[in-house]
Amino acid sequence: MRAGLVLLCLAYVLSQFFRAFLAVLSGPLERDIGTTPDDLAFASGLWFLVFAAMQLPVGAALDRLGPRRTAAGLLLIGGGGGAALFAMATAPWQVNFAMALIGAGCSPVLMASYYIFARQFPPARFATLAALMLGVGSVGNLVAAWPMAWAAETMGWRAALWGLAGLSAAVAAGVIALVRDPEAVTGKARGSVLDLLRMPALWAILPLMFVAYAPSAALRGLWAGPYLRDVFALDTGQVGQATLVMGLAMIAGTFAYGPLDRIFRTRKWVIFGGNLVAALALAALILWPDNGLMLSVALLALVGFAGASFPVVIAHGRAFIPPHLAGRGVTLLNLFGIGGVGVAQFASGPLHATASAQGVLAGHVAIFALFAGALALGLALYLFSRDSLD
């Protein structure tokens, strides 16, 4: 089981990479195949929305087939095949199709791990284990920053994507060989996602799940690149270095959140406080978007650090989900988290294009305002949630 979790963690490194690498390729892709930032926002949104839509079938597959076959099959076809298609892209629509396919391939990876944690470890350890997996896997977020920018400038982005296609296939083979499925739940208990949606305990958690991950994921995964390039005239390598700082902050935040629920004996207020800090950092970017490169990078890093509550929100919701619905439960929560990023990316592209008519800076301020407003609304609804540490 330990070796299998290591392979799933490596697969999650790939998942984190694929959701974030477009930020540093915005320049080379625009030069080679004519993609604009709005095109890449749409492609990134497709990755997240397909990923989110796959959570329902993935949840059923985890409960019925187990994490081994579910994760390996989708990663091989979607991750490996999608990366290969991206490497051959000659037009923006092909990038869109490739990103959608990669989103499907990455969709079961983290949830396969969370399913194993939910089924085979004590509930009180779920948040810490979930944060550990997320934090270690977020190395992919770092590789998608400066290292990917370096690869694009030295060997070319097409060669890098071919290498990623091969790596995805190799990791999928390792998952099928080393991951072991938990024993099936015995008894006659049955259920569906509809049973989960009828649970009042989840109603105030799901809205925050929908908006909490979007600011850090969308900014790190795409908008930080055009923002830093347009406002501060950074080149591809410099954008990679700046987004590396944000990626490191996101990993540090994930590890920091992990044990806090047990230290403070509350999940609700740990989550609320952290996301309030992220909202305030976004407000500062709205007020001072061009006051200095160091300030902007520091605020982006703070959004990443404080917005890394994803595993604790999953743990908060997981506490109310019965064992026979563990797979569907964690994937439902993940659907809201990843789906929120996809919706945000689809909305951000047209918003940026419209607001940019008032100037380049106005387009980016509008993006920050979108994320700040959505997060504030999610926090207001989250106040009605019920705390849990079980």
Image: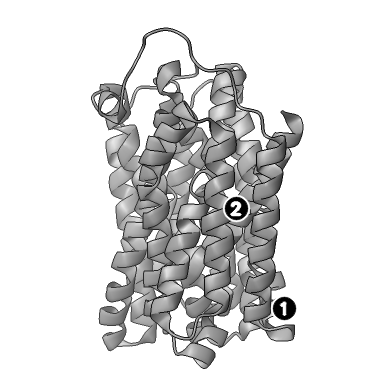
Seen in the picture, residue 361 relative to 142 is either above or below; the reply is below
Q: Are marks 1 and 2 in contact (CB under 8 Å)?
A: no
Q: Position of residue 346 (x, y in %)?
A: 32, 66
Q: Can residue 291 be seen here?
A: no
Q: Classify mark 1: helix, strand or loop.
A: helix
Residue at image position (65%, 45%) is 135
Residue at image position (29%, 32%) is 204
Which of the two residues, 62 or 140, is positioned nearer the viewer here?
Answer: 62
Residue at image position (64%, 39%) is 133
Q: Earlier in the sequence, mark 1 or mark 2?
A: 1
Which of the two residues, 288 or 342, is positioned nearer the viewer here?
Answer: 342
Which of the two residues, 310 or 73, is positioned nearer the viewer here?
Answer: 73
| Nearest to viewer (mark 1 / mark 2) | 1
User: Would you identify the image quadrant in which residue 240 lies?
Assistant: bottom right
Q: Which mark is residue 250?
A: 2
Horizontally, residue 353 falls left or right of residue 65, namely left
User: Would you identify the image quadrant in which residue 214 lies?
Assistant: bottom left
Horizontally, residue 373 falls left or right of residue 82, namely left
Disc 1 designates what residue?
Answer: 150
Q: Residue furthest bottom?
A: 31
Residue type, label 1: Trp
Q: Can residue 166 be seen here?
A: yes
Of the 4 image quadrants, the one containing the N terminus is top right
Q: Position of residue 115 (x, y in %)?
A: 53, 29
User: Spatial distance from mark 1 to mark 2, Cα to Cα?
Assistant: 21 Å
Q: Which mark is residue 130?
A: none
